[in-house]
Image (tube, rainbow, N blue to C red):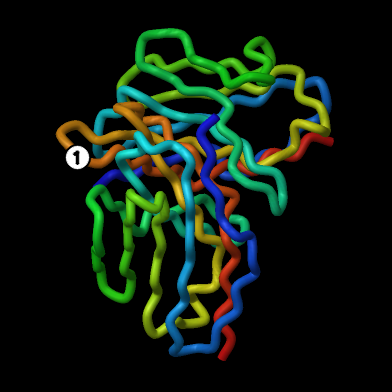
Amino acid sequence: GAVVSQHPSWVICKSGTSVKIECRSLDFQATTMFWYRQFPKQSLMLMATSNEGSKATYEQGVEKDKFLINHASLTLSTLTVTSAHPEDSSFYICSAGPLAGRTFNEQFFGPGTRLTVL
Amino acid sequence: QKEVEQNSGPLSVPEGAIASLNCTYSDRGSQSFFWYRQYSGKSPELIMSIYSNGDKEDGRFTAQLNKASQYVSLLIRDSQPSDSATYLCAVTSGGSYIPTFGRGTSLIVHP
């Protein structure tokens, strides 16, 4: 249980284009999903918290107009990187949780999407 | 500012030894504690969660929590080369489900 998928697993795009990344909870409903970014050999950086049916909450320093997040259902959240530039190249990871009725507030991570902007 | 501190390592142990990974946190209101394993180029995988003081064992893994001293540790018994990864400590506080992650400790288990 508690499986989270992401699509695509990797993407290469040209500078100036937009890229959409999907995050799905496959076997549970996720009222909250989280989007992280991780540069090589760096720690996870939380970008935003996404709640179903409401606007995402962005961390300080993350441009909400550049990183558009939509959480339209209890099983799907999307991150769109608009007008991508080479400095946006990174490993984008979503997570979902906690599970309803659980004592712990575990998050379950998707496999990640590696974005390369040329 | 909630902080979670981990020694970045690398921690190098021989195969079969016990690996001990430590994490300290600043918020005394912290309630839930997690250990994630992250292989190079992969996303984190939850391996242990602990809520109460004391030890929690799951297979070769034991999580230890000491709220008075504000630390949580992870012991890996009979370490295997496949345990070589970065181990992330995460903490949630006061009803929040948004964890604060440490920077991770790199573990190398050599044959």
Name the side, left or right, on which A59 lies relative to A11: left
Name the side, left or right, on which A37 lies relative to B57: right
Amino acid under disc 1: Thr
Q: Between residues B16 and B7, which one lies in front from this camera angle?
A: B7
Write the residue at 43% across / 36% down.
Answer: B27
Percent position (x, y) of residue B73?
Answer: 41, 62
Percent position (x, y) of residue B96?
Answer: 35, 27
Name the side, left or right, on which B15 lies relative to A91: left
- Which residue, as the protein is rendered here, is positioned at the far front? B68
Is disc 1 surrounded by few (<14), some (14 to 19) or many (20+) residues within 10 Å? Answer: few
Above or below A104: residue B12: below
Q: Quadrant of the C terminus of chain A?
A: top right
- Secondary element under disc 1, as helix, strand or loop, is loop
The image quadrant of residue A105 is top left
Name the side, left or right, on which A52 lies relative to A77: left
The residue labelled by disc 1 is A103
Q: Between residues A51 and B23, which one lies in front from this camera angle?
A: B23
Above or below B72: residue A71: above
Write the residue at 57% across / 44% down.
Answer: A9
Write the residue at 39% across / 71% down.
Answer: B75
Percent position (x, y) of residue B30?
Answer: 36, 38
- Which residue, as the protein is rendered here, is positioned at the far left? A101
The image quadrant of residue A37 is top right
Write the residue at 39% across / 85% down.
Answer: B78
Count how many numbered circles sit on residues in the image.
1
Above or below A37: residue B69: below
Q: Name the chain letter of the residue that bears numbered label 1.
A: A
